[in-house]
Every structure is written in structure tokens, then in C-alpha cells.
């Protein structure tokens, strides 16, 4: 059972100089980030600049070329995803189809199988169903038949089922209507109250600034700017950061490369 | 880049000399080994056209080989044709077999192609067994006449003529494959293999290119089969057997799929090794089977891959010593064919 | 006429049982790992020879021999996965490499079988020679037993996949490998256990096979090929489809054997396969991929 003695404020996640990518295409050049327990961090940046690749690499889905990942004092660099999730680091990937031919309840219960979360699986399930009442209604429906918003709710629910210390969400609002985004935002606020740490990568700036404490801008595989979300920059400042001077076409990892 | 062993004129001369000198280099009982090796080299190299360069899970190649072999047997024995004509016929039937094998898999990818093409060979096997009137059934057809030039049989003096013929054929095949792979057609095959969507969006016609590859390689395999039957004077259902399939695959993967000469080298090595194994009965299958497995695990790019990588690193070291400037971008120095691609998290 | 149809039907039941057991194992492997196991026939062969050795050589009753052979085969299946699948599954071209590697292992196993058990024809004694009268025909009880065993095992597998933790993990890996890893499932363990279960099914198939016909080391591939056809025919994604497909093909096989002769029935089956692939590449029975 993973111990809960992480004090608020102590370092939970420490990523140093992460380099990752596909073959010759190192999409993540030199990414470092740092998260304290109880904090929540937003990752901003144009698509294709390495946010997803970095998140996949540090949670064991993708290959790390170099750099280190320290989580709760332990070195998790290069460990496979199924070991990393056991340490309390849960990742919900972008646009995940989850398990399309299993029902909502089956999906949620599968996510609760880890030692430490297993014993209280059914209580956690109830909690998730209270957070997302729609999921209780649709418990026997197959994921493939759900709407995007409902699927995202299941995804977040699955994230919670493993009772993680840190939850990483990649593009949770992708393709969702504003009303649904708002629901998810509210739920995530409630989740944060329980002390869960969060890293969220997304394109919806308002969503992120409402939800998180700090932000970091990732471009060309590096963190180029960061700040606190207490002060939301004006739209003009945002434009300048995103577009002015930094605008470069995203490298395409698929283009022209041989992959066997 | 497909390294052309014959790129320098000196190599040409050397190659022709070696072929001409074959009967002197290889005497007596070794000739049957050499001839077998040359035949397998042609089989493996032509197979690599669809399997390695085309990236198509083609398991039907041995079928084309068998079809060509039976063409030679049936036409020269039952229909009394001149064996040289039979060779041409075998090229035709091999090509047709290639097209027929490809047709059912036109709309498929990957695994299904492997399955259907594998079944194609089985279909040939059972068809041969089911038509004993034509093919001799399980007894096969024997008495295949040797090729002759005038009154001189190529089989004379332990196959001297065959040795020359096959040596020259292999050289011709190498040149042909080199030309094919350097042409637009060859490059389009590789492009379709590596990134089909991109290639198709650039206007390449996948079906046309792939069926042409099947026809070409089938044709070559057909001729190879015909030569095999012509030399060994008998055609039987073992031409379609798993033995050939496993043997062929072991040669291709041992030699390396990335180069034209890879499978040829693999064929040579495996034939020589196999020769030592014929006395061992059942151990032969065991050793070839597990040997192939070991090669697949530890030599993913085959011997050709190892040789080419060694040569590259040698030349890079020499350049570095010569220029004395630190080479910061080592990873860029390797051409794509030599660098081990990163494993992806696909199933 | 009725006798003819009945005897074709009985033959179809035996063949269908054999094909179902083989094809369900292949289907499980295909849907979880995305590869065809060319060594499946070798597993069939090893199962048959193991049961034979235990019953004919060691003198154990066939039923007991079968029960002992089951865990042995499960172990061999997991071993096969470790040496011929695991090294390649994550490589580029992994699926092709696995096919070649399992083919190589199949070849090696044929040699091993030849070495250990010799090239002679072997046959396992049927469990019982009792017969049942159906109309004017005597139906061997073993035929009904084979049918019953097949249904039990295949339906049992379907139930296990639906209801157990392991089944959920297998389906998870099958549907979304990345997500499965993210919830802590180790794909390698699932793969090994899938191969083990497929081998157990192959062991049952071996019982059916080797009690109805003689086996030699060279006979590993024949039933495998028909099982492949069943896999494609039945959509390769649904075990129910595999069952239906297997018995349909068993029927086709036995009917063509009766009317055209033994040498034409494989041709008929393969021609059917080609036709199916031309008309409906995804198979006849709806399932996924």
C-alpha cells in the first residue's frame, strides 16, 4: 500500500532535462518541470510541440532518450507504465478510447485493480458515481456508445479509481462543448479539494487558469515560459507568447521517416 | 541507400571472372552444394523483393518456385518440349502464379496477407496431389531432361554447365534487382512499405506496384524452380513443402532483408551449414528451426546488417581521425538502413 | 440417403470440434496479440504425443493421460510465448517476425517429434468404444463426447472472458494496450497466459484428433491450415463466430470428402476461403477488426 506521508509542499514530481521522441525525431528536447504535493500545474503550448510526448514518456508509455523522472523521492525513469501507476502516478492520455467494448462499470472497476486501491474499489466506485451522476446511470453501457464528454468523465473517473497521488490529464477538454467543460472543471475542483495533485495539458486557457496554480509553456520540446495562474495574462499577451516570435511549424514525427 | 556491390568497374570484371572460374573453384562433389546454394540464393533474393523491400507478408513465394518447377517437368517430360522453352514457360507460369496469389489479398493488410499467401502454397500442394494424371501426384514426375546446348548436356562432368549457368543467372539477377530497386518502381515499393498513406497521397498506385512486384518475383522464382527441377531431374510435392519455406525464410533473415545481396549471402551460409546437417536426420529440422529463431532474436538485420554497420563505423572512425574535428551529430551519421529503428509501443 | 447424411453429419461434428478448439485458441491469440501462431499445429502435435506416451507407454487410462497433459501443455504454451513471441512483439515488423519465428519453432518441433516418437503412425485409444443407436446408424459415444467437450471448453472460455478478472484484463489488453498498461496490467503476463489457455484448448483438440486418426510428426500443419480458414471465415473476433464457422467448415470438409474424395476437400475449403476474402475481407460473421 503506497504510503500517504507526502507533506503538502514537498516535492512530488521532479522531471529534469527530459529528452524523448520517435527515432531521429526527438520531439521533446529538454523539458524540466517540478510539482509540489497538492499543487496543480497547467501545460500550455501549440500542438505537436512535445506536451503529449513528454507526458507519455514520463509515465512509461513512450521511450525516454535521456533525463530523469523523480516521483515522491523515487527514480521512475524508464520504468514501464504498469509499474509507474503502482507508485501513484496516473495518466489519462489524450482522446483515449478507453476500453470501447467494455461497459462503464467494467472500465472503472478495471482501473481500481491496483494493490492499495483494490480493497476499497467499490467505495471508490460509489464516490466516482456521486461525482459523475451520469456514469451511475450509464453503468452498463459500452464506452463505444458514449458521447465524448461522457467518455472523458469515465476517463477521469478511472484516473481516480486508482487512488493516485498525482493525476495527469492530457487534453481533457478536447472536442467538448463549453457546458461539458464546465461540468468537468467543477468536478476537478472538487477532486482537488481532496489534496490530489494535478498536471493538465490543454488548449483551453480559461479552463486551465481556473483550475490550476501555475502554468508552463512548452514550445519546440522545451519549457520557454512559466508563471502563476493568479494573474491571467491579457489576450494580447497570450497571443504574443504563443504566436509572436515563437511561431514555428510543428515538426511532424511521421513525415518521410522509415519505420519498419 | 542500396549499396551496389558492382558500382565500380573493377567489381564487374571480378564478378564475371569469378563466375567463369566457378568450375575450377568448385570441383566434384562440392558442385552439387554450390549449385544448390546458387539456386537458393536466387529464390531468397527474389523472395526479398516482395517480403523485404515490398514489406508484404508474402508467404507464397515457394508456391511460385514449385509452379515453375512443375511447369518444367510437365512440359519437358509429358509434352516433350525443349527444356529451354520450358524455362521460358516457367517464367510465364511463375508470373501468373504471382498475380493469382496477389489478387485475393488486394484489399488486405499485414497478417491476412500472410495467411492467404500461405494458403496459396497449400492450395498448390493439394492441387498437385489431386491431379496425378498431369503432375504425377504423390509420386512426382521424374526423368526431366537436362538442359543442353547443341549436343552438350549441361549436366556433364558433374554439372559443370549448370554451375556456369546458375552463376551467370545469379549475377544477372543481382544486376536486375539492382536496376529495379534503383528505378522509380523500386523506390515506390519502399515508399509504400514505409508510409503507405504518404506514398498514396503522392500519387503512387499501391495495387499496381505490388502486383507488379509479385509478378516479377513470381517469374524469377518460376525460372529458379525450373532450373532446380532441371538439375535434379525430378519434380515432386516437396517443392511446396514447409521445408523450403522455413529454409528460405532462414536464408533471408540470416542474410538480412535490407540489401539485395543479403539473402544471397544468407543462402550461401545456410546451404553450407545445411550440408553438414543432412546426416543428422531429424536434428536438421531442429537445428534449422531453432537456428532461425536465434538469428531472428540476435541478428535482426542479418549478417548484411552487421557487415554494413561495421563498415560504416570503420569509415566514420577513419574520417574522424583524419579531420580531427569532433563529430557532434553521431546519430545523424548513420543512414536509415543502418540505424536500429526505435521500438514503438504498438502491439 | 439418410444414412449418408447422418454419417457426413457425424464426421462434420468430429471435424468441427477439432477446428473449433484449434481456432478458438488461435482467435484468442489473434485478438490479444495481433499475430497468427504458426506453431499452433506443433502444440497440437505435442499434446497428442504427450497423451499418447502417457496412455500407450505409461499405461495410464486415456482420460487421466489427458488430465495430466493439460498443465504440461499450458506450460509449453507459455514457454512458446516467451521464446518465439516476446522477443519480437515490440519490434517494428514484430507481427511478421512472430510469424516467421513460430514457423521456425514448428519446424523444429516436427524434428523433435520425429526424434522422440519416431515417424511411425500412432493413435490414441478412444475413451470408449461404446456406440449409440440413432436410427439405423451406430454413433460412437466418443463423437458425442468430443462435441460435448468442445462446447464446454469454448463456451467456458467465453464465460471466463466475460466474468473473471483475468478475462477482463485480457479484453482490456485486446482493446487498448496502452490504457491497459496505464491501469497496471502487465501485457507480458497476459500474453503468456493467453498462450497457455490456447495450448490447453489445443490439447483437447489433440485428444479429438489423435483418437480419430493416426498422427505422425509431419501431420502438425494440416489441421492448422483449416483452423486458419475457420478463423478468417468466422470473423476472427468473436468466439461464437468461430464456433459457427468451425462446424460449417467441418460440414463442408466432410461433405466434399464424401462426394469428391479426400484429396479434394482441402482444395474446396481453400477455394471457399479465397472467395470469402474476395467478397468480404472481414469475414462472414460480424465481429471487430
Image: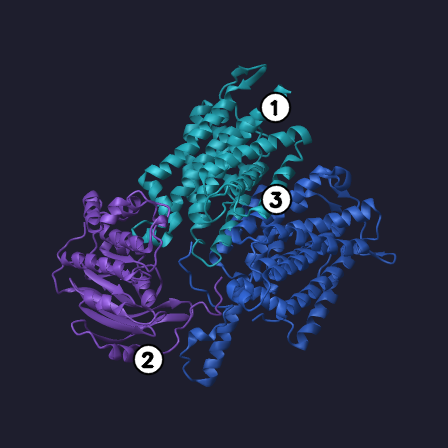
Q: In the visual, does B292 lie left or right of B170?
A: left
Residue under circle 1? C5
Q: Judge by depth and name the residue closer to the eye, B199 or B324.
A: B199
Q: How is the image coloured?
A: by chain
Which residue is located at x 60 percent, y 30 percent?
C254
Q: In the visual, does B41 lie left or right of B202?
A: right
Discs 2, 3 touching: Cβ within 8 Å: no
Q: Position of residue B304 (x, y in %)?
A: 55, 64
Q: Position of residue C223 (x, y in %)?
A: 56, 37
Q: Judge by depth and name the residue closer to the eye, A69 or B195.
A: B195
Residue C207, placed above or below residue A111:
above
Q: Which chain is purple?
A: A
Residue under circle 3? C275
Q: Residue A246 got which mark?
A: 2
Badge 1, how many Cα within 10 Å: few under 14, some, many 20+? Answer: few
Which residue is located at x 19 percent, y 58 percent?
A186
Q: Chain of mark 2?
A: A
Estimate the spatial distance between the alpha carbons at disc 2 and disc 3, rounded to whole Å: 57 Å
Per the image, label 1 sits on a secondary structure element best described as: helix
Q: Which chain is blue?
A: B
Residue A113 appears in the picture as rendered: no
Per the image, label 3 sits on a secondary structure element best described as: helix
Residues behind callouts 1 and 3 on a single chain: yes
Amino acid at each position: 500500500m503506497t504510503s500517504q506521508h507526502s507533506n503538502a509542499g514537498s516535492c512530488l514530481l521532479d522531471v529534469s532535462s527530459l529528452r524523448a521522441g520517435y527515432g531521429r525525431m526527438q520531439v521533446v528536447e529538454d523539458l524540466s518541470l517540478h510539482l509540489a504535493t497538492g499543487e496543480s500545474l497547467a501545460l500550455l503550448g501549440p500542438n505537436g510541440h512535445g506536451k503529449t510526448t513528454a507526458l507519455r514518456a514520463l509515465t512509461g508509455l513512450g521511450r525516454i532518450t535521456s533525463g530523469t523522472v523523480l516521483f515522491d523521492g523515487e527514480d521512475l525513469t524508464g520504468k514501464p507504465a504498469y509499474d509507474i501507476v503502482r507508485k501513484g502516478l496516473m495518466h489519462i492520455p489524450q482522446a483515449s478510447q478507453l476500453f470501447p467494448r467494455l461497459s462503464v462499470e467494467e472500465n472503472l472497476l478495471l482501473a481500481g485493480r491496483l494493490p492499495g486501491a483494490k480493497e476499497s474499489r467499490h467505495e471508490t466506485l460509489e464516490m466516482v458515481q456521486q461525482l459523475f451522476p451520469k456514469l451511475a446511470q450509464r453503468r452498463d453501457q459500452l464506452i463505444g456508445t458514449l458521447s465524448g464528454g461522457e467518455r472523458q468523465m469515465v476517463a477521469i473517473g478511472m484516473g481516480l479509481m486508482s487512488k493516485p497521488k498525482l493525476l495527469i490529464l492530457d487534453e481533457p477538454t478536447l472536442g467538448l462543448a463549453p457546458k461539458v467543460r464546465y461540468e468537468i472543471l467543477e468536478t476537478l475542483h472538487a477532486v482537488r479539494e481532496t489534496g490530489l495533485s494535478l498536471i493538465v495539458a490543454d488548449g483551453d486557457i480559461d479552463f486551465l487558469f481556473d483550475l490550476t496554480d501555475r502554468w508552463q509553456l512548452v514550445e519546440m520540446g522545451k519549457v520557454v515560459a512559466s508563471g502563476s495562474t493568479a494573474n491571467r495574462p491579457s489576450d494580447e499577451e497570450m497571443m504574443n507568447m504563443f504566436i509572436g516570435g515563437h511561431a514555428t511549424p510543428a515538426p511532424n514525427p511521421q513525415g518521410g521517416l522509415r519505420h519498419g | 541507400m542500396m549499396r551496389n556491390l558492382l558500382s565500380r568497374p573493377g567489381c564487374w570484371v571480378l564478378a564475371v571472372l569469378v563466375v567463369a572460374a566457378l568450375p575450377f573453384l568448385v570441383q566434384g562433389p562440392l558442385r552439387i552444394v554450390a549449385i544448390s546454394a546458387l539456386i537458393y540464393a536466387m529464390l531468397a533474393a527474389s523472395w526479398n523483393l516482395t517480403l523485404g523491400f515490398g514489406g508484404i507478408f508474402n508467404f507464397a513465394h515457394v508456391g511460385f518456385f514449385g509452379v515453375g518447377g512443375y511447369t518444367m517437368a510437365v512440359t519437358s517430360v509429358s509434352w516433350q518440349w525443349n527444356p529451354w522453352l520450358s524455362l521460358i514457360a516457367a517464367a510465364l507460369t511463375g508470373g501468373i502464379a504471382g498475380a493469382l496469389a496477389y489478387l485475393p489479398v488486394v484489399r488486405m493488410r499485414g497478417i491476412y496477407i500472410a495467411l492467404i499467401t500461405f494458403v496459396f502454397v497449400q492450395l498448390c500442394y493439394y492441387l498437385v496431389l489431386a491431379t496425378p494424371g498431369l503432375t504425377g501426384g504423390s509420386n512426382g514426375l521424374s526423368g526431366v531432361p537436362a538442359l543442353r546446348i547443341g549436343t552438350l548436356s549441361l549436366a556433364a562432368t558433374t554439372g559443370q554447365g549448370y554451375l556456369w549457368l546458375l552463376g551467370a543467372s545469379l549475377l544477372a539477377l543481382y544486376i536486375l534487382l539492382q536496376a529495379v530497386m534503383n528505378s522509380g518502381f523500386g523506390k515506390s515499393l519502399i515508399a509504400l512499405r514505409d508510409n503507405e498513406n504518404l506514398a498514396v497521397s503522392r500519387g503512387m498506385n499501391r495495387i499496381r506496384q505490388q502486383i507488379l512486384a509479385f509478378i516479377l518475383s513470381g517469374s524469377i522464382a518460376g525460372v529458379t524452380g525450373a532450373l532446380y527441377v532441371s538439375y535434379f531431374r525430378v519434380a515432386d510435392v516437396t517443392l511446396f513443402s514447409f521445408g523450403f519455406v522455413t529454409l528460405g525464410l532462414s536464408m533471408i533473415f540470416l542474410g538480412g532483408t535490407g540489401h539485395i545481396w543479403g539473402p544471397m549471402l544468407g543462402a550461401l551460409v545456410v546451404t553450407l551449414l545445411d550440408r553438414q546437417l543432412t546426416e543428422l536426420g531429424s536434428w536438421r529440422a531442429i537445428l534449422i528451426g531453432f537456428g532461425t529463431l536465434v538469428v531472428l532474436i540476435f541478428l535482426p538485420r542479418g549478417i548484411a546488417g552487421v557487415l554494413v554497420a561495421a563498415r560504416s563505423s570503420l569509415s566514420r572512425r577513419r574520417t574522424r581521425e583524419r579531420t580531427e574535428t569532433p563529430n557532434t551529430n553521431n546519430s545523424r551519421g548513420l543512414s536509415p538502413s543502418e540505424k536500429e529503428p526505435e521500438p514503438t509501443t504498438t502491439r | 440417403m439418410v444414412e449418408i447424411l447422418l454419417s457426413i453429419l457425424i464426421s462434420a461434428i468430429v471435424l468441427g470440434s477439432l477446428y473449433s478448439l484449434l481456432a478458438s485458441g488461435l482467435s484468442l491469440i489473434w485478438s490479444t496479440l495481433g499475430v497468427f501462431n504458426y506453431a499452433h499445429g506443433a502444440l497440437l502435435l505435442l499434446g497428442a504425443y504427450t497423451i499418447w506416451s502417457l496412455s500407450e507407454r505409461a499405461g495410464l487410462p486415456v482420460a487421466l493421460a489427458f488430465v495430466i497433459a493439460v498443465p504440461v501443455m499450458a506450460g509449453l504454451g507459455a514457454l512458446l510465448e516467451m521464446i518465439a513471441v516476446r522477443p519480437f512483439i515490440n519490434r517494428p515488423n514484430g507481427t511478421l517476425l512472430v510469424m516467421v519465428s513460430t514457423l521456425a519453432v514448428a519446424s523444429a518441433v516436427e524434428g523433435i517429434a520425429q526424434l522422440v516418437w519416431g515417424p511411425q503412425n500412432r493413435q490414441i485409444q478412444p475413451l470408449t468404444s461404446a456406440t449409440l443407436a440413432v436410427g439405423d446408424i451406430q454413433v460412437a459415444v466418443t463423437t458425442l463426447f468430443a462435441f460435448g467437450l468442445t462446447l464446454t471448453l469454448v463456451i467456458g472460455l467465453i464465460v471466463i472472458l466475460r466474468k473473471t478478472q483475468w478475462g477482463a484484463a485480457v479484453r482490456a489488453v485486446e482493446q487498448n494496450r496502452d490504457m491497459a498498461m496505464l491501469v497496471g496490467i502487465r501485457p507480458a503476463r497476459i500474453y503468456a497466459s493467453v498462450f497457455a489457455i490456447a495450448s490447453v484448448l489445443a490439447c483437447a483438440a489433440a485428444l479429438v484428433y489423435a483418437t480419430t486418426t493416426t498422427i505422425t510428426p509431419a501431420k502438425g500443419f494440416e489441421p492448422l491450415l483449416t483452423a486458419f480458414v475457420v478463423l478468417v471465415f468466422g470473423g476472427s473476433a468473436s468466439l461464437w463466430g468461430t464456433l459457427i464457422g468451425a462446424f460449417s467448415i467441418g460440414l463442408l470438409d466432410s461433405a466434399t470428402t464424401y462426394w469428391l474424395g479426400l484429396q479434394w476437400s482441402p482444395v474446396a475449403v481453400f477455394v471457399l476461403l479465397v472467395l470469402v476474402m474476395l467478397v468480404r475481407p472481414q469475414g462472414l460473421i460480424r465481429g471487430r477488426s
